[in-house]
Amino acid sequence: YLVDTNVPRGRKGLLEAMARHGVEPRDLGYILVTHHHYDHTGNLAVLKMMSGARVAAGEKDAEVITGKRAPGGPGDITRIGRLLRRLPPSLLERYQGFEPCEVDLALGDGDALQELGLEALELPGHTEGGMAYYHRGERLAFVGDLVSNIFRRPGPPVLSFSYDKKAILHSVRRLAELDLEYAYPGHGAVLGPGASRIVARLAASLASRWGLS
């Protein structure tokens, strides 16, 4: 399986990275989407066509991925976010290179992907329907943009493209409660070993920084 699909212009690099690991598109059985932002879904429709893989995504973000609902802008957390909210949805879609894609599995919180040994966890805040995929036996999770680790500095998602600080904090705290040795963020290096402790420290830092309980 593959988790997220990069931006459209990153297709060549993505396919080359897969090839280095001995994986061709036809080998994919599933493509798991953490959230609907275009830097995670930019090659989704093409890869689904190339591979015949089943696409799984959170049920709320699935409405955007399939084109049934416009992506819209982020929340009003930052000045940039407030500016982006004023842009017409059609302009956002054109900028993002959005190409709708069929979603085979619209997942709710706690749904199991038994064939893969994964559990889908709804962790909103960056988007309304953001998901993580947790492998309990391997003690790892693919967490999308809920947590970043750019320059090996664990942090929250980019707030200009997020919509709700309280939801982010709640989701980060929930992630910290998992038995988690490694967390794979959408941006930056792998968190771990000891990912649960790292994420718990991040949650405490965010609560203090944002003045939330």
Image (tube, rainbow, N blue to C red):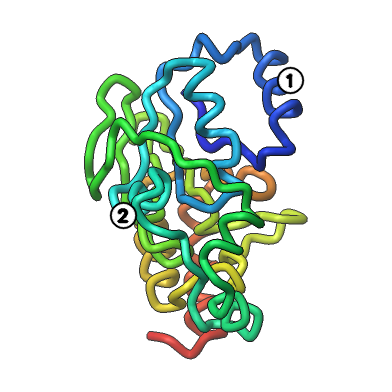
What's the mark number on residue 16?
1
Q: Mark 1: which secondary structure? A: helix
Q: What residue type is labelled 2?
A: Lys
Q: x%, y% of residue 1? A: 46, 23
Crowd rating for badge 1 (residues with CA inside 10 Å; few <14, some 14–19, many 20+): few
Query: Residue sitting at 62 percent across and 55 percent down?
Result: 94
Q: Taking 159 as reference, is 55 left or right?
A: left
The amino acid type, in three-letter code, at marker 1 is: Glu
Classify 157 as above or below 43: below
Q: Contact, CB < 8 Å: mark 2 with mark 1?
A: no
Give the residue number, with chain letter if any, for mark 2. Answer: 60
Figure quadrant of the C terminus = bottom left
Residue 182 screen position, x and y as percent: 52, 41
Q: Nearer the viewer, residue 113 or 140?
A: 113
Q: Where is residue 167 in the image (x, y as percent from the top left)?
A: 38, 72
Which residue is found at the position 51% from the left and 71% from the top?
Answer: 74
Residue depth check, mark 2 versus mark 1: number of the one nearer the observer: 2
Can you see residue 191?
no
Quadrant position of residue 8 = top right
- In percent of width and height, residue 113 lies at 28, 29
Residue located at (56% from left, 80% from top): 86
For image coordinates 40% across by 54% down, the residue present is: 130
| 36 relative to 31, above or below | below
Q: Is residue 106 something one can see in this rendering? A: yes
**Left or right relative to 183: residue 78:** right
